[in-house]
Structure formats: C-alpha cells, structure tokens
Image (tube, rainbow, N blue to C red):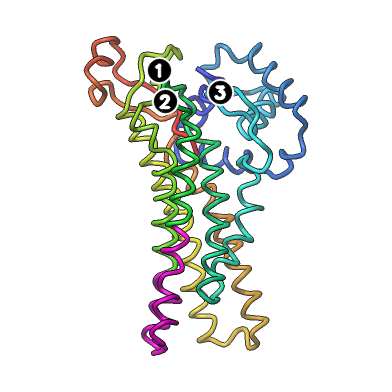
Amino acid sequence: MDANLRFWRTEGQSFFQRFLLWMDVLDPLLLLKSSDEIRRARLLLENSGRTLSEPIQNDQTKQAFLLSLSSVHPDTDKITPVLFRPPAFLPISLPLVIVSSLQLQAKHNFFYQFVFHTYTTGFTLLNGNGTTKAEEYSVQQKQIFYGLGAISYAACIGALPFVFMNRYTLKSPLTQLVVKKLLPAPLLGLMSAFTVVVVRSPEFENGIEVMDRNGKVVGVSQKAGEKAVKETALSRAVLFGTTFFLPSVLMHFVERAKFAKTPRALASVRMLMITSVLAGMLPVSLSMFPQCGEIKRADLEPEIVSSTEETELFYNRGI
C-alpha cells in the first residue's frame, strides 16, 4: 500500500481528522516545492513509513507526508502537474466559479462553463484511481475522449436556461427568479457530478485494485470502482452546488436589507461570499468520504471473496 494511503488510513478515519488534514494539504505554499524536494520527501517516507500503524509524532515526517499527499499520485507514484494538484484547485477554480455565476448572455455563459468544466475534468482525470488496465487502447485516451464530450454537454446544459429565456423573451419576474437564482446551483452541481462519472467510467467498467490491510493487492473490483466514483461525484456535486446556492440565498437578504447600495458594492459582496463558501466547502467536500476507501468483502465479486479471509478491503478513492 502506498505511503499516502497508509497515512489516510491511519490519520484520516473520522470526518474531523480528514478535514484538519485537508486544511493542511490544501496549503497553496506547497505548490512552491520543487520536484527534488518532493522526491526527497517520498524517499524519507519509504525509509521511515513502512510500518506506519499509529499517529505520526515526528514533525519532519508529517511535513513530508503533507508534501507527498499534495503532490504525488498514490497509485502511479508520479508527481502530479502543478496546476492539477489539490492545493491549486481553489486558486484556479475560484475565478472560474465567479465568472460562471455572472448573469451574462448564453454564449458567454457557455464559454465560461466550458472552461470551468475543462479544468475540473482535467483535475478529476489526473487525480482519479490509477489502476492499470489491460486493453487494446489507452484508458487515458478513452477518458480524454469521454471527458471532452462530458465538458461540452455540461456547458450546453448550463447555458440552456439562458438560451430559452432570451429566445422566447421570457422576462417575467418568476422566470428571472428560476433561471438566474434557482437553476444555476443544481445544474452546476449535477453537471460537476456528471463529468466525474463520465471521465472515471473506466474505473467501474474495468475495476480498480483492492488491498488487504497489509497493502497486498487482492484483486480488481468493479464494485469498488463504482463505489469510489459515486463517492467522488457526490462530493463534487455538494461542493459546487453549495458554492452556487448559498451565496445566492445570502445575496437575496443583502439586497433586501440594502447593506450594499451600489452595483459595485453588491458585486464585491457576492465575490466575497463565493470565495468564503468555496474555501470552506472544499475541505468539507473532500472530507466527506475517506481517501483510503473501505469496502466489505461480502460486497465484492465472488472471485475476490474466495481469495481472501479479510472482512474489509481497501482502495484508493481518488479526488
């Protein structure tokens, strides 16, 4: 079992533990670390973390783990590109969320959502489960192809309410409320979950590796892959659905109370609310489910059930 997964299994058993860990892992300063520093951290973990079975006390070792968790894929042992590491997710996705929330023309809305879903899909692709699968074609090529289709579809769905409103000149207050206030949050949440499911579909089609508590690979399970993708999709839907919905609700009360009286002041308050909600919801959504996922042996395929006596098996859920 990779050092990252061992660490999550030992120190991330409860939601609160995972939340505190993610608060550290999402530190943008970790993006400034060089590849050599990351490799040295991994080497330190390989030399000192083979028997990790209790909480870490050594600060140097813990810092090495944080750097490893923020930079290295636990299945491939490769360093993740800087822009797609967890600490980069908030700085890059925040401006994309803000511009996607603006009530613009349909074509502008489509463009911004296309860029937004392109980034989040790339993040999903590079941080999903990396189980090697033997196929006639590259799994990653298949995921890229699926991802492009999912991105285009999600951007179209996001812009569709504005197309109908403009095409049929639906300008009533009720229409404005539904299209501009109520629909964006569930649509963005659903489309974010949709892109996760599509781009990671090979995981439940072909299966992912499951391990016993000692890290030995027991087999490849489609059911574990399905569970990993569902959990990640749900966490992504909660993240962006809440990030769109909560600021809209709060802005409604701000406008009614007339705290901000000018359009510029209202825009500033809205940006501050989106920033605060996204920054708070990101570690919450990532902490909803364990990174080192658990699945009962009885829930797996018969060939895996018959190959081990372990009652619970483990897998990398991905991000």
Relative depth, front residue between 308 and 202? 202
Disc 1 designates what residue?
Answer: 211
Q: Which residues make up the magenta segment?
A: 154-183
- Residue 260, compared with residue 17, is above or below; it is below
Quadrant housing residue 61: top right
Disc 3 designates what residue?
Answer: 76
How far separated are the C-alphas under marks 1 and 3? 15 Å
Q: Where is residue 195 in the image (x, y as percent from the top left)?
A: 44, 49
Question: Closer to the N terminus: mark 2 or mark 3?
Answer: 3
Q: Is the magenta stretch mostly helix, strand or loop?
A: helix
Relative depth, front residue between 88 and 292? 88
Task: Say what amino acid the circle numbered 1 marks.
Answer: Met
Query: Is there CB contact under 8 Å for labels 1 and 2?
Result: yes
- Residue 249, compared with residue 316, is above or below; it is below
Q: Is residue 214 left or right of residue 264?
A: left
Looking at the rendered structure, the number of numbered marks drawn on it comes to 3
| Residue under the point 41% across and 73% down | 161
Point out which mark residue 315 bears: 2
Question: Closer to the N terminus: mark 1 or mark 2?
Answer: 1
How far separated are the C-alphas under marks 1 and 2? 6 Å
Dot 2 falls on a residue whose secondary structure is strand
Local crowd at mark 2 within 10 Å, few (<14), some, or many (≥20)? many
Does the segment drawn in magenta span residue 162?
yes
Local crowd at mark 1 within 10 Å, few (<14), some, or many (≥20)? many
Quadrant housing residue 3: top right
Task: Say what amino acid the circle numbered 3 marks.
Answer: Thr
Q: Where is residue 309 in the image (x, y as percent from the top left)?
A: 28, 10
